[in-house]
Image (tube, grey):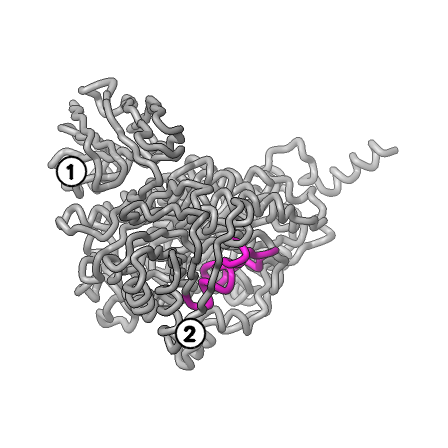
Amino acid sequence: MANATTAQALTDRPWADTSLPPRERAQKLVAAMTLEQKIAQLHGAMETIDIYALAAQAAESGEDMEQLAAQIRVERHVAGIDELGIPRFRITNGPVGVGMGDGTPSPPATALPMTIGLAAGFDPELAREYGTVIGSETATLGQHVLEGPGVCLHRIPTAGRNFEYFSEDPYLSGVMGVEVARAIQEHGVIAMAKHFAVNDQEYERFRANVEVDERTLRELYLLPFEMLVKDAEIAAVMSAYNRVRGTYATENRYLLHTVLREEWGFEGYVQSDFWSCRSAAPSINAGLDHEMPDAKWLNEANVKAALADTSLEIETVDRALVRRYTQMFRFGQFERPYAPGQIDAAGHGAISRRIGEQIAVLLKNDDRVLPLDPGVGRIAVIGQATYVDEACLGGGGSSKVDPLYTVRPMDGLRDVLDGLGSSAVLEKVTVADDLSNLDEAKAAAAAADVVVIMAGLVATEGADQPDANMLNDQNRLIAEVGSVNDRTVVVLKDGNPVLMPWIDAVPAVLEVWNQGSEDGHVVADLLFGVVNPSGKLPTTYPKAWEDTPVAGHPERYPGTDEGAGYPVIRYSEGLQMGYRWYQAQGIEPLFPFGHGLSYTTFEVSHLTVDATETDGTTPLSLEFTVTNTGDVAGAEVAQVYLSLPAAAHEPPKRFVGFRKVWLEPGASERVSVVIDPRATNHPLSVWDDGAHDFVVLPGEYVVHVGTSSEDTPLTATMTVA
């Protein structure tokens, strides 16, 4: 009887046959749907609102996007169809934890360190742990999609969403993004790469048009997306708000079809960013498959009208649905009942703490002020409320996570000092935003044996930082407090590079990023040497705004009106972005890409390559020795850069490989790094417009190995015939 019932069920619903390939199941399901059912599945179920009018109103009133979002109940789902067995499709935001989910407010989750911080770990295994926490919690909360990772680049240091993107470097972004995406999808959750493409700034993101040449687009801004498609088999891509070469990203057939599907072989589906869809027929014809969060455009009236006037064909509608359902079947989401569970707060918090400790970057440590001696007498902890009173959770906007718990800075310090058997006295001074009690802070600093200043910034989606002087009044706080005690440590908690006009006033600076839930414990462990910092900067820190690629170039940022009424942002710096810019221009940054000190010292030596001549297709194997020459266990990130032949007209170096090596004092390890010309990051190649492909040029290539983009003492030369 049971077998007969099952057979009848499969006859009624052939798409329920789990022995069939996911795409075939999707095709059978779509074939059984009415037109109205199909249209209802093209979009989210939220009530339609005019987000652009609300955004304009917020801009006029001075509200930021986070305040705007708080006024809106954002629904993140597609309604289910019970008679077809289609589940309610639940979508949650990322990429720094399980953020806004299906319904607002969302259930609490682990507030992880920001993505920029994860990239500072320079460790793919760390990225996999990060993705595992996110994927596990997304699945536990009964969600189907995690909108992340974000792999746009840090083109400008003030961009509002740098905190949720990895790096200024496309290869590092791709490597870390691939591991995060793989780990998320191992939990039966759809990962979604965003924001496709060149959504590298928040200013006028609904209107701006980005003009970028093809070579720059391919070698930099599309590269991490290409790696996610090919190496992670990512299930979904989110299109961006902005225009690209005059056409909105959601209507850009070249990006959504030609590049993504024809050239890269993408088999997933494309979702709009929330309210980024701008049309019905043009969007879905271009390759957009799913509008979120509402039906402003892909509603019944618009779609039926487009079908009637033949600007849209029903096969194109079917194609969009088959693409999404294929991924849902791929991950078993039709068969999975909705049964939210309990997140392992303690276990995931411990992972968050471990990640946080490995991503901190020791920027400066004169006279080895750090680590602090637990036996020190009196410690003054000084800073504004955001950084000393509460855990610094990180960026605002749709990616904000409601934490399961937090560890405040003072609580974390007390926990760690108690564990070390310390009797140190902690004194906290919370400095007013207007610095009205700065004298009190200076008096406490003068009376202390050690001063810890906690400072930083918390960026938010929807707005870039107003200027490069990102710490504002905190600069004065640091300079004046640092002047009264020569044992002052600055702990930076931020999601963007910051200017440091006070850098000579303090002996030690530790960048810990926006840490999330475990802020207090992580910072304390690092300050007192329970953990040795091993992070490296994933983004260049300039000395001054005037040194950046966009300074003095309004056409590069924030863009200029060229007659169409909207800002046009021209990426006229080309390939000279990030460390490539500073090296090509001969400008010394404050701290270069890849920089990071340790409580111990390391030496990288004895570079060998397995070939000095190659045909440009054979993998090149490098070996070198990393030695811990100090007296503390720690980790070094050995970095490999490549200089291309002069005919390539490239900036001096490109980042092509790395290895994080953990060593006891006095220990050495022989490290191998393989540079594969056929890899998805195209390490030896340049984009050739004539060939419309990546090509390896003949000539002399120089391999550089060291510990930052500016410190590469080991070199070797190879020739491509």
Percent position of residue 94, x then y? 51, 53
Which numbered dot is residue 432?
Answer: 2
Residue 336 in magenta stretch: no
Q: Left or right? Give the position of 578 relative to 66.
A: left
Q: In this picture, which residue range is highlighted in magenta?
A: 383-412
Q: Is residue 215 above or below residue 464?
A: above
Disc 1 packing (10 Å; few <14; some 14–19; many ≥20):
some
The amino acid marked with disc number 1 is Ala
Residue 391 in magenta stretch: yes
Q: Left or right? Give the position of 315 relative to 370.
A: right
Tell which residue pokes out farthest to the bottom in this image: 61
574 and 598: which is toward the camera: 598
Quarter of the N terminus within the rendering: top right
The structure residue drawn at horizontal position 44% and vertical position 54%, both measured from the top left corner, is: 377
Magenta segment's dominant SS is: loop
How far is mark 2 from mark 1, CA to CA?
Answer: 53 Å
Percent position of residue 394, x then y? 46, 59
Which numbered dot is residue 648?
Answer: 1
Percent position of residue 374, x then y? 45, 47
The amino acid marked with disc number 2 is Ala
Q: Is residue 629 visible?
A: yes
